[in-house]
Image: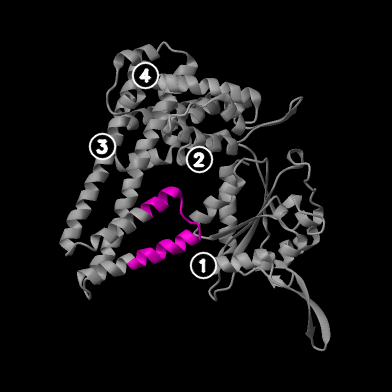
Amino acid sequence: MNITDAKKQIKNTIRSYLKKDDYGRYVIPLKSQRPILLMGAPGIGKTALMEQIARELSLNLVSYSITHHTRQSALGLPFITEQTGRSVTKYTMSEIIAEIYDKIESTGIKEGILFLDEINCVSETLAPALLRFLQYKYFGTHKMPEGFVVVAAGNPPEFNRSVREFDIVTLDRMKKIDIEPSLEEWLKYALEEGVHGSIISYLNIKKDSFYKAETTVDGLEIATARGWEDLSHIIKAYEAEDIKLNYDEVRAYIQNTEIAKDFTMYYELYTKYENDYKIGEVLKGKTDDKSARRLGYGSFDEKLSIIGLLTSGLNGYFKDYAKEDDFVTGLYDALKRLKLYLDKWSYKEAATAVLEERNVAYKQKKAAELYTNTSEETAIRILRWLESSLSLDSFDEVKESFNKETEELNAAADRAMTALDSSFRFIEVAFGKGQEMVLFITSLNMDRHAGRFLSDNENEKYIKYNRELLFEEKSKQIQKELAELKYTFD
């Protein structure tokens, strides 16, 4: 299955495992909670998937690569002790179990996920103990605390020479989920994470280049989802420092000679198109009809590149709006709390109490690694704003300062709307209502930040073209169903 469907299944399983009855007991006992086994090619995002799930469910995440463990570190060190008049071997606490308890103590969150990566590469000496852990949740003489769900991940044998095949005894104790690389699902993730537009645009054109792992005369050649995302980070860093990207840099991340060469050439064209068509100016509302008409006669790759540039640029505007919206919403919640405290405290006392509450909540969430980069930035902005508000003298002054923040939110919405309207005009002049418009609308529909912005801010052209797109898709589906019926009755 693709990674999105796998995510849903994993979240549903974890929710079921953590469900309690009226007496506070887990409905499914720890012993009967089968560990989830994710099997899939390397670099498709299994670890990132578990990080997302832990954040979304507000759970602790303790992550280990099982290949880094010896029998001693996993089970604990043995020692002899006297018990009822006889010598008994016991173990110090497992490093893994100890980490779970440390995590609970530092975050205050008692439930979580224990993620064991590369589980089918475990050493022969550790394998029997691991099997016992999967069934009984014990490492040595120490049991994993209730409230933690075990998720393991491994690569199929064709991708890793050190992989050991699971026997029926082990597999029968796990809930196995096979994950396949899916470009369509990864592109949704890429838009969410702000992967560089050149990569998104390139993979929309060269879909077969998304994931490859093959052995050639020159050795192993690979291109993975992880590689594309890491390459995106270096491209952004280089562009910020005005450093030219070359083939050797691309090849360090996309370790497939042909794909690396192809993308390097495409990236050069991509940056050229961005300058030639002044996409940055278009997004500011300065559409050049002459260059738009010229694009209408361009090559297929050129047209798709421009759609990618517009989509990527808009994604930045939509994200800026979302950041301001999250900031203002979080600030509003804090000020509601502040106003409540004013019934019994002075302004200074109330503001200090709210700031302290927010600081504690931030530290706990930070320790549990529940923040994304963006959500942490928002939390820090709110803390700094509340800290600066301590210099004010009344709640009326706070409200006045808050109103300025809402004005910035409105300004961010206006900038995003201008960019969207201008993009629609550019595409209309270049392509009319052709397939390029369909691609543009489809890209917007895949972008969660675009969806959020458009649900808050109505855009007539989006509504119009999206309705036409949905109608066209529905018509095609009806025609397909009619053809199948005709075939059946014939």
Looking at the rendered structure, the kind of residue marked 4 is Tyr
- Magenta-tinted stretch: 356-379
- Front position among marks 1 and 2: 1
| CB atoms of marks 1 and 2 within 8 Å | no
Estimate the spatial distance between the alpha carbons at disc 1 and disc 4, rounded to whole Å. 52 Å
Residue 2 is inside the magenta segment: no
For label 3, count other residues whose C-alpha is less than 10 Å away and answer few (under 14), some (14-19) or many (20+).
Answer: some
The quarter in which the N terminus is drawn is top right
Estimate the spatial distance between the alpha carbons at disc 1 and disc 3, rounded to whole Å. 42 Å
Estimate the spatial distance between the alpha carbons at disc 4 and disc 3, rounded to whole Å. 23 Å
Number of dots carrying numbers = 4
Principal SS element in the magenta part?
Answer: helix
Looking at the rendered structure, the kind of residue marked 1 is Ser
The quarter in which the C terminus is drawn is top right
Q: Earlier in the sequence, mark 1 or mark 2?
A: 1
**Where residue 414 is drawn, which disc sits there?**
3
> Helix, strand, or loop for circle 4?
loop
> Helix, strand, or loop for circle 2?
helix
Question: Residue 49: percent from the left, percent from the top?
Answer: 57, 48
**Where residue 189 is drawn, which disc sits there?**
2
**Where residue 277 is drawn, which disc sits there?**
4
| CB atoms of marks 1 and 4 within 8 Å | no
Q: Earlier in the sequence, mark 2 or mark 4?
A: 2
- Asked whether residue 435 is in view, the answer is no
Q: Which residue is mark 1?
A: 106
Residue 361 is inside the magenta segment: yes
**Where residue 220 is drawn, which disc sits there?**
none
Left or right of 111 in this view: 361: left
- Asked whether residue 207 is in view, the answer is yes
